[in-house]
Image (cartoon, rainbow, N blue to C red):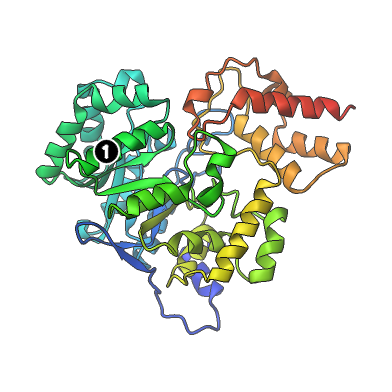
Amino acid sequence: MNVTLRQLFAAAFAGGEQSPAPKVTVRTAKHGERVGLLGYGAMRLPTLDGGHANTWDEGASSQGIDQAMVNEHVDFALEHGVNYFDTSPAYCRGESERVMGEALSRHPRDSYYIATKLSNFSPSQYSFEASKKLFEDSLRYLKTDHIDFYLLHAVGNGGFETFGKRYIENGILPWLFEQKAKGRIRNLGWSYHGDPKAVEWLLAKHDAGEYVWDFAQIQMNYVDWRHAQEVNKRNLDASYLYGELERRGIPVVIMEPLLGGRLARHNEALSGEFARLDPKATQASWAFRFCGTYPGVLTILSGMTHKENIVDNVATLSPLKPLTEAELIGLERAAQAYLGTGAIPCNSCNYCMPCPFGLDIPGAFEFMNRVRDRRMADPREIRREYERAIPDPRRRADRCIGCGRCVSHCPQTIDIPKELDAIAAFMEGLGR
């Protein structure tokens, strides 16, 4: 039976006194836009065969994105006040903007906000002309004459030198502000992954009035709030980033509220803490309420691949129930319990893929995190789990040769070869 989102939502609230179409809490952007607190992230779109939409490797979808399902998601989202749609030329093997353009253009243009990015990641895209073309192509694919929220994508990823080549040396920044003056860009901002020097530069330019930013997108969740640097010294804690933006009046867009889904899946390290707070609440709902509790947050992005995801998230934020002080303390305990598992900070973005030697890098990391979370000790059980996670032995961690080509692509700056080597050593240590 093909159950629609509307039917699923009605079933979830059967017997309650919910209005026919509850609306998510609304926040106000810098220029008065009324934005739903839940944002639709278009990096993990549903596919026709259930394969991954954002990778080219063996786990990728062979049939492509399910346009009809995306249309249904968009319709349901708009009906419930979710009006911020975040995409990029780099998402879903370059198909995300086109698919979202098809889905959104079925609705009045003033009923939704489009966010997309200058994703000039490849050196072949660094030039002024190539970067300009990315912007013009975005308008065409998205079937619009303006972008509501345009971002410099993943500033600092690859280091400050790369940041300079992508945005400063090519002269693209003055041109983007010209497009804003012409109304082709309504809000101009940036998303941050990588070198802290990039953030320092961007905020210094803002303070000097040279480049004034309308919003910024950061990774924020109850783990990264205080512990991002603890996980990786190159990271900045979300509490610091949020504080710097809030005191300047720059609205904050949140990415990775669920750490690539890791804070939404059943997790032994978290379940005990959450059961004490509210045994009926989903793990995802705690993560969204955490982010929404902070008033400087404009919207919280979620890559809602499945119907259940969007239904649960809409319910959580219709309306937002801010966390109490006791609940915030409980989430900090949960964060410490999560960190105690030694989880690899992989968010399954798949930017590291495809591996030139065929390894399933995200699959190996997800396997290892499950072993640590469940405290698996039986070698036979662990081997069975590994075989389920990566059936093909040629794609497992021990095949890594340490070439390091994946490292520069990782937004979380994970030392991928080192982690794969540790997994291989761990499996070898189990014996036969």
Name the quadrant containing residue 378.
top right
In this rendering, the answer to whether 41 lies above or below 118 is below
Counting from the top left corner in percent of width and height, residue 145 is at 16, 45
Mark 1 element type? helix
Q: Amino acid at mark 1?
A: Ala
Residue drawn 36% across and 49% down?
Answer: 244
Residue 153 can be seen, yes or no: no
Asked if 120 appears above or below 373 in the picture, the reply is: above
The N terminus: image quadrant = bottom right
Tell me, yes or no, if residue 270 can be seen here.
yes
- Give whichever of 204, 231 is nearer the camera: 204
Q: Which residue is mark 1?
A: 204
Residue situated in front as seen by the camera: 77 or 242 = 242
From the top left corner, tell me how far across and down residue 130 is, in percent.
24, 23
User: Quarter-wise, where is residue 404 in the image?
Assistant: top right
Depth check: give the residue in front, 240 or 125: 240
Task: Give the crowd class for mark 1: few <14, some 14-19, many >=20 residues within 10 Å.
Answer: some
Residue 119 in the image: x percent, y percent? 33, 32
Closer to the camera, 285 or 245?
245
* The quarter of the displayed image where residue 266 is located: bottom right
Name the residue: 29% across, 41% down. Answer: 203
On screen, residue 291 versus residue 118, left or right, reads right
How many labels, in total? 1
Q: Residue furthest right?
A: 432
Q: Quadrant of the C terminus?
A: top right
Q: Which residue lies at the image location 48% right of the left edge and 53% below the top edge?
A: 304
